[in-house]
Image: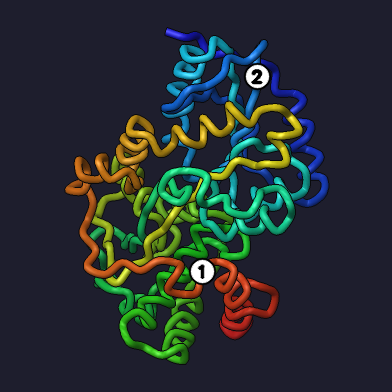
């Protein structure tokens, strides 16, 4: 058994405070041990430290995965490796990396956030081809979580527009999960033969029922499950599975179809690892996430694994979806961010119309 190496986090916390002072909020400044994957690694000299920056709902699997990687890395290289983890809204975490937080590895809620890091010169083009499964390590879908007994009778996407329902979802300006929710709502129309005009009307009607927009999916879930606010929660499937396991969810959640394939990417922050001399460890960690051991843990924590052999073992745990579409159906994340979430984009237009 390898004992985790824990070092003082004062330096990292000071860096995070500097970012907060600049107007960026980071979720988490806690040491977390971490782990490796297949392939040959070169032994390093002395101890080494990595910073993993991730979005809020990944903490549960990483609390289990990172210690396994650390032990694996120690066994293969003889090097003590400390991994610190920071959790928060994906958009906020992306901004923090751009503003100078020296992340070695980032696992964000959507590829669109990684594209922003590429545009900022921190990640080299072609990042998706550097790791297995196009650098995606998890999948999920959007689910509808009603109150006990489902008093609103919600069964499908279209039911969300019914009068009298109060909706809970996070803010697409800060939350990657909220962007997936938005695309799920939009695609429920356009992927079923509906027009853009119909999608605009439907999505506007749903967001008129949203009284507040929490900063991330975890905060939205807490508002609904712990504070009793709202009639229906839109969230990740893995969040609903976690809530059910913790006894916070008393009614079944709903997995509507069509649904969007929520893909979670991992990326090595090229500029940082080359400057810090941490590339080998960072690449090993990023690769480990798609390996069978990590993928089984992701599945146990409610994420749909991308590893085909693991998915074959666990698929019966997840609700079938008759029609899944991806971000590619909207032209990819560059187009999505420009069309929907840029300043003055469709989200801003619809939000202004609902207030």
Q: Looking at the image, is 274 positioned above or below residue 209?
A: above
The image quadrant where one finds the C terminus is: bottom right
Q: Residues within 10 Å of mark 1 (few under 14, many from 20)?
A: few
Q: Residues within 10 Å of mark 2 (few under 14, many from 20)?
A: some
Q: Residue drawn at (40%, 51%), measured in percent from left and top?
A: 225
Tell me the quarter of the picture where residue 324 sits: bottom left
Distance from label 2 to label 1 (Cα)? 36 Å
Q: Which mark is residue 48?
A: 2
Q: Residue drawn at (41%, 48%), measured in percent from left and top?
A: 133
Q: Is residue 163 left or right of residue 336?
A: left
The image quadrant where one finds the N terminus is: top left
Q: What colouring does the structure picture have?
A: rainbow
Tell me whether circle 2 and circle 1 mark residues in contact (CB < 8 Å). Answer: no
On the image, numbered disc 1 is attached to which residue?
A: 332
**Image spot of residue 220 (x, y percent):** 49, 55
Q: Nearer the viewer, residue 1 or 147?
A: 1
Q: Nearer the viewer, residue 246 or 235?
A: 235
Q: Secondary structure at mark 2?
A: strand
């Amino acid at each position: 058994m390898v004992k985790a190496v824990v070092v003082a986090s004062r330096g990292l916390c000071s860096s995070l405070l500097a970012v907060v002072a600049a107007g960026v909020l980071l979720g988490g400044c806690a040491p977390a041990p971490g782990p490796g994957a297949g392939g040959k690694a070169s032994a390093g000299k002395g101890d080494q430290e990595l910073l993993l920056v991730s979005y809020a709902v990944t903490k549960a699997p990483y609390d289990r995965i990172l210690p396994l990687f650390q032990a694996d890395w120690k066994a293969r290289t003889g090097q003590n490796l400390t991994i610190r983890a920071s959790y928060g809204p994906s958009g906020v975490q992306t901004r923090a990396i751009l503003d100078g937080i020296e992340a070695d590895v980032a696992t964000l809620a959507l590829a669109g956030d990684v594209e922003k890091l590429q545009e900022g010169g921190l990640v080299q083009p072609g990042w998706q081809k550097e790791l297995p499964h196009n650098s995606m390590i998890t999948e999920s879908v959007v689910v509808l979580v009603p109150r006990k007994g489902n008093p609103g009778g919600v069964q499908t996407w279209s039911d969300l527009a019914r009068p009298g329902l109060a909706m809970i979802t996070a803010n697409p300006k800060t939350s990657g999960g909220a962007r997936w929710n938005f695309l799920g709502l939009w695609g429920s129309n356009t992927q079923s033969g509906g027009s853009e005009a119909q999608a605009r009307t439907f999505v506007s009607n749903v967001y008129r029922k949203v009284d507040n927009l929490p900063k991330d999916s975890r905060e939205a879930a807490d508002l609904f499950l712990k504070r009793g606010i709202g009639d229906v929660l839109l969230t990740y499937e893995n969040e609903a599975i976690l809530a059910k396991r913790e006894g916070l969810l008393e009614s079944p959640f709903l997995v509507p179809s069509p649904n969007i394939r929520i893909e979670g990417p991992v990326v090595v922050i090229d500029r940082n690892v080359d400057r810090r001399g941490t590339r080998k460890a960072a690449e090993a960690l990023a690769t480990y996430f798609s390996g069978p051991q990590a993928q089984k843990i992701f599945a146990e924590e409610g994420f749909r694994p991308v590893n085909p052999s693991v998915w074959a073992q666990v698929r019966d745990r997840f609700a079938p979806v008759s029609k899944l579409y991806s971000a590619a159906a909207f032209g990819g994340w560059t187009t999505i961010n420009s069309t929907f979430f840029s300043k003055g984009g469709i989200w801003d237009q619809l939000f202004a119309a609902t207030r």
